[in-house]
């Protein structure tokens, strides 16, 4: 039996955009809503089968725009054709010669136009729209953010909206970067960022740079309050889903690059630095917490070795006692800092502590055995500082493993149902 995504690809190749907007569209598009492991999320019966169809009037489409061209009008016309009745368009301080595009867009009764007098950035534009939506659309279910340059097909915007309405979860419209027509810079940039997210934050995201996101109303107050006014805001939004336990799904969308993405206002060096700075900050907070705890641990270990060592009390017995006493103090400090300042865990403190020490005690045992094993292997005469050096080197080796386990298990956020 052909895989669902294969069927979708064939349909998209066979039918024109206009033909695609017919009765079986709902069934086709919602079957495409699947996770990164390519399992379909859910199905939706086509019209005429006795199933109530979602009402897109409950969804607002948010379009931030800076210095647009004719593609903006095409995007708005496409959204209206696909059933959207509320479009929030934000002019983020565009040049005077570009204002006529906004005036033309505002002639559509479905469009509400917001203005920034000066360019404040995509993040600021999104937050302006979210604030306006929360104040003026009290009965709406949520928003879908999209780009105004035609890189998000209305069918994909609709698919994300329908999936969000069905699940009440945040939805990311993700592109397939393995397609041959994807620009080299975009393909590799996203893969690197996805790897960094996985390695340093513990999040698996197929498309970290997607601007197509369907956000339920319940999540907008939280996501509106996070930092960032430019492209880094979208990265902060992804990080916030982990910090606040906001569950999200991925929906595969068409990969469209118009004119090699030349219309994008993304500044490669400056905006990339802002994004990676946010991602690495999470890891470096953990590194700082671990470094402080390690200094306390190492200092106590060396002092205890110097005080307690005798001709009759040496070897693994000395290593074990000194390491256990030092770790008892440093682990409490490390647990507190990791819970409060690194992972921002809201889990019950005793439950988190139980899991923390379920990791810390085996880690301590491994550290004792490795420390004593290296010390015996080198055959070096006893010296507190040398023993401390070996102890510290082993601690560094275990550092990364401990970070990954704490991130994914000890202080993992409980996702929304």
Image (cartoon, rainbow, N blue to C red):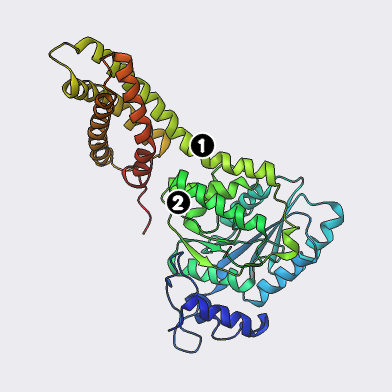
Quadrant of the image containing the C terminus:
bottom left
The local secondary structure at tag 1 comes to helix
Give the image location of residue 141, x and y in percent.
51, 64
Q: Is residue 25 left or right of residue 398?
A: right
Q: Earlier in the sequence, mark 1 or mark 2?
A: 2
Q: Is residue 229 visible?
A: no
How many labels, in total? 2
Which disc is residue 265 wearing?
Answer: none
Residue positioned 75% across, 58% down in the render: 263
The local secondary structure at tag 2 comes to loop
State the residue in front, 105 or 17: 17
Q: Residues within 10 Å of mark 1 (few under 14, many from 20)?
A: some
Which disc is residue 281 wearing?
Answer: 1
**Spatial separation of the CA atoms under disc 1 and disc 2:** 15 Å
Task: Read off the residue under disc 2.
Answer: 203
- Asked where in the image residue 363 lies, by quadrant, the reply is top left
Give the image location of residue 301, x and y in percent.
28, 19
Q: Is residue 138 visible?
A: yes
Q: Residues within 10 Å of mark 2 (few under 14, many from 20)?
A: some
Q: Is residue 36 above or below residue 356?
A: below
Q: Is residue 350 above or below residue 31?
A: above
Give the image location of residue 267, x and y in percent.
71, 47
């Amino acid at each position: 039996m052909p895989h669902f995504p294969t069927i979708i690809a064939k349909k998209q190749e066979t039918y024109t955009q206009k033909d695609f907007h017919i009765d079986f569209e709902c069934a086709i598009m919602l079957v495409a809503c699947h996770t990164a492991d390519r399992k379909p999320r859910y199905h939706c019966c086509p019209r005429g089968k006795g199933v109530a169809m979602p009402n897109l009037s409950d969804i607002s489409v948010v379009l931030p725009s800076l210095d647009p061209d004719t593609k903006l009008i095409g995007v708005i016309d496409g959204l209206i054709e696909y059933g959207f009745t509320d479009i929030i368009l934000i002019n983020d301080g565009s040049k005077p010669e570009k204002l006529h595009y906004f005036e033309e867009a505002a002639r559509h009764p479905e469009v509400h136009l917001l203005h920034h007098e000066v360019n404040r950035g995509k993040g600021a534009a999104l937050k302006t729209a979210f604030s306006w939506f929360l104040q003026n659309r009290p009965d709406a279910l949520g928003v879908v953010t999209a780009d105004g340059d035609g890189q998000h097909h209305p069918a994909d915007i609709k698919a994300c909206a329908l999936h969000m309405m069905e699940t009440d979860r945040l939805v990311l419209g993700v592109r397939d970067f393995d397609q041959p027509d994807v620009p080299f810079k975009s393909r590799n940039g996203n893969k690197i960022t996805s790897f960094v997210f996985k390695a340093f934050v513990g999040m698996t995201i197929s498309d970290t740079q997607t601007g197509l996101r369907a956000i339920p109303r319940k999540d907008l107050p939280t996501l509106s309050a996070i930092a960032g006014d430019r492209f880094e805001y979208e990265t902060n939004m992804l990080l916030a889903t982990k910090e606040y336990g906001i569950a999200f799904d991925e929906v595969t969308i068409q990969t469209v690059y118009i004119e090699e993405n030349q219309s994008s206002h993304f500044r490669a060096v400056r905006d990339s630095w802002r994004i990676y700075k946010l991602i690495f900050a999470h890891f470096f907070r953990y590194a700082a917490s671990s470094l402080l705890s390690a200094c306390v641990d190492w200092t106590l270990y060396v002092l205890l070795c110097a005080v307690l060592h005798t001709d009759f009390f040496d070897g693994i017995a000395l290593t074990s006692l000194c390491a256990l006493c030092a770790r008892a103090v440093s682990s409490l400090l490390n647990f507190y800092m990791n819970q409060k300042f690194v992972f921002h865990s809201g889990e019950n403190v005793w439950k988190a502590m139980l899991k923390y020490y379920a990791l810390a005690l085996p880690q301590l045992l491994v550290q004792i055995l490795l420390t004593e094993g290296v010390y015996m292997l080198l055959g070096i005469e006893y010296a507190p500082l040398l023993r401390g050096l070996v102890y510290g080197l082993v601690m560094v080796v275990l550092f990364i493993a401990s970070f990954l386990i704490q991130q994914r298990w000890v202080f993992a956020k409980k996702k929304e149902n």
